Amino acid sequence: MDGIKLAQIILSELLDGGDGFAKYFKPPRYMMDFPSIKELADSEGVSKQTITRRFKGGPYGSYINFKRQARVELAKQLLSDGMLVGDVSILCGYSDKSSLVREFNKIFGMTPKQYLYFNDN
């Protein structure tokens, strides 16, 4: 599934007021496939402000927060598949390995390797 299709499904769920869109949540294989807010707005035929308002009312509060969560979910998946942290950081759109480690520490209170250890056992 490409990033625009994913974002459209989630946007549709947000508009329906449903909170069960997690069942549709499959991050794109790489973050560079994720649409910008302008691309998403153009594909929906609405303004960027409309997209911003729609995400503001949803569980993530903003498209940026949604993309941040998607990056972490994708990173968890790739790390579980055995990829190295440095490679995962690049594929998930982080500027470097340290940025991914910081994000994991902020969200989970542990490094990616620690997260895998405690969640794979």
Image (tube, rainbow, N blue to C red):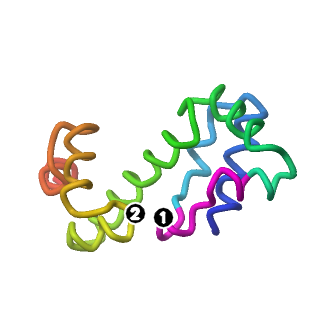
Extent of the magenta region: 28-40
Amino acid type for the residue under numbered disc 1? Met
Nearest the viewer among 61 and 114 is: 61
Q: Is residue 2 left or right of residue 17?
A: left
Disc 2 marks a residue whose amino acid type is Gly
Q: Which residue is mark 1?
A: 31
Q: Residue at x 25, y 63 (%)?
A: 96
Question: Residue at horizontal 58%, vertical 47%?
Answer: 23
**Mark 2 nearby-residue class (10 Å; few <14, some 14–19, many ≥20):** some
70 vs 72, left or right, is right
Q: Which mark is residue 93?
A: 2
The reply, left or right, for residue 70 in relation to residue 59 is: left
Q: How many marks?
A: 2
Residue 84 placement (x, y as % from top left): 21, 72
Residue 50 spot, x, y in % from top left: 77, 36
What percent of the width, then of the height, locates residue 87? 27, 74
Q: Are marks 2 and 1 in contact (CB under 8 Å)?
A: yes
Closer to the camera in the image, 67 or 16: 67
Label 2: state its secondary structure. loop
Residue 104 vs 6, above or below: the answer is above
Q: Could you tell whether 118 is left or right of 3 in the image? A: left
Residue 90 appears in which quarter of the rendering? bottom left
Query: Is residue 86 rendered magenta in the image?
Result: no
Q: Are there few (<14), some (14-19), or many (20+) residues within 10 Å of tag 1?
A: some
| Closest to the observer, 21 or 63 | 63
